[in-house]
Amino acid sequence: MNTQSHTQSTSRSLPIALLRARETVMAPIRDMLQGIQLTEQKWRILRVLDELGEVEQSAIANEACLLLPSLTRILRTMEAEGQITRRQDSQDKRRTMVKITDDGRRILADNLATSLAITSNIEAQMGREKLDHLLDLLEELQAVKV
Amino acid sequence: MNTQSHTQSTSRSLPIALLRARETVMAPIRDMLQGIQLTEQKWRILRVLDELGEVEQSAIANEACLLLPSLTRILRTMEAEGQITRRQDSQDKRRTMVKITDDGRRILADNLATSLAITSNIEAQMGREKLDHLLDLLEELQAVKV
DNA sequence: GCAATTTACTAAACATGTTAACAATAAAGG
DNA sequence: CCTTTATTGTTAACATGTTTAGTAAATTGC
């Protein structure tokens, strides 16, 4: 008799189900990224910067779902590798503004087709409606007060 | 004009939506665990071991969604802290069998009520039906071939 | 039986996750 | 103004994630 007999099997545990689903979705993206020496996180950062233009680090952290200490380290290497640039904001000197470089954009452009193909593949197998419904439910879950 | 104008906003990106939803769900659990010096991963391991009894490490890795190298390290410290025991399997000497100790079980028992309350809270806010539906969709997503 | 392959796990190296503490600047409130 | 508080970001320390390589034992296939 176990302590947790009241609880669900792992496949019906929300935290684990979310983790496993994410592994499934990320697997082909990781395959793509491994070919170009980019981590999942750096890829997300490049996409956010391409989408938002020049932004402060908190905004990146928020959009790309990273904590600031991680972001600090990652941006340091990305700057050294020439994928982004950073400069102090003149108005608010606490802020660092970050921008994607042409090299960074090139990485995105080179992998856009593969990225879209991965998304399409999942959509084709699950169906657009189900996928939209799933995204709605996930959005709703994020709004839950904890 | 950005490179990614074809793509969805981050809130409709499946990988990020899954990540954010998971953050929401884990936040109160992390609060609980911080009080008892346990990481999210160790908590999952204890629950799996309580549920499955004595099992090999690959089974834990699979159930708790951890890679073996991470598991090796984590189990080493958990053994040192007396929450689990490990022994070589006599039939198949490659296998290491892992079992939860009474101390480990006590940790689970002490936090069962809090854990259940967190689950109930989410269920109360989202509704059981939606939650079940979400779990169904996540299960379906995991089955997608990539 | 035995070589080749597979399985179960470990080790090492590097990247990120996570928390706590801190520095610098800006905003708020008196 | 000037103190207090909040915001922005960094650093450090430790835990885990991820990949590659390696070891030992079991299984396969001939």
Image (cartoon, coloured by chain):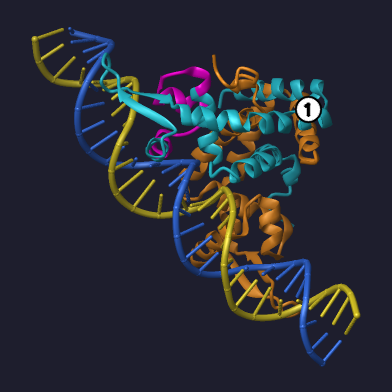
Chain colours: A orange, B cyan, C yellow, D blue
Residue at figure coordinates x 27%, y 13% from the top left: B91
**The N terminus of chain A sits in image quarter:** top right
Chain of the residue under the numbered disc 1 shown in the image: B
**Residue A85 found in image quarter:** bottom right
Q: What amino acid is found at the position of numbered circle 1 in the picture?
A: Glu
Say whether residue A96 is magenta: no
Which residue is painted at 54% across and 34% down in the image? B43
Instruction: Look at the numbered disc 1 and give the secondary structure of its residue.
Output: helix
* Closer-to-camera residue (B108/B76): B108
- Residue A104 percent across, percent down from the top left: 58, 59
Residue B125 visible: yes
Q: Which residue is mark 1?
A: B123
* Residue B70 vs residue C20, the one in the foreground: C20
Residue B102 position within the rendered picture, expressed as x and y whole percent measured from the top left: 46, 27
Q: Is residue A43 left or right of residue B114?
A: left
Q: Which residues are magenta?
A: B50-74
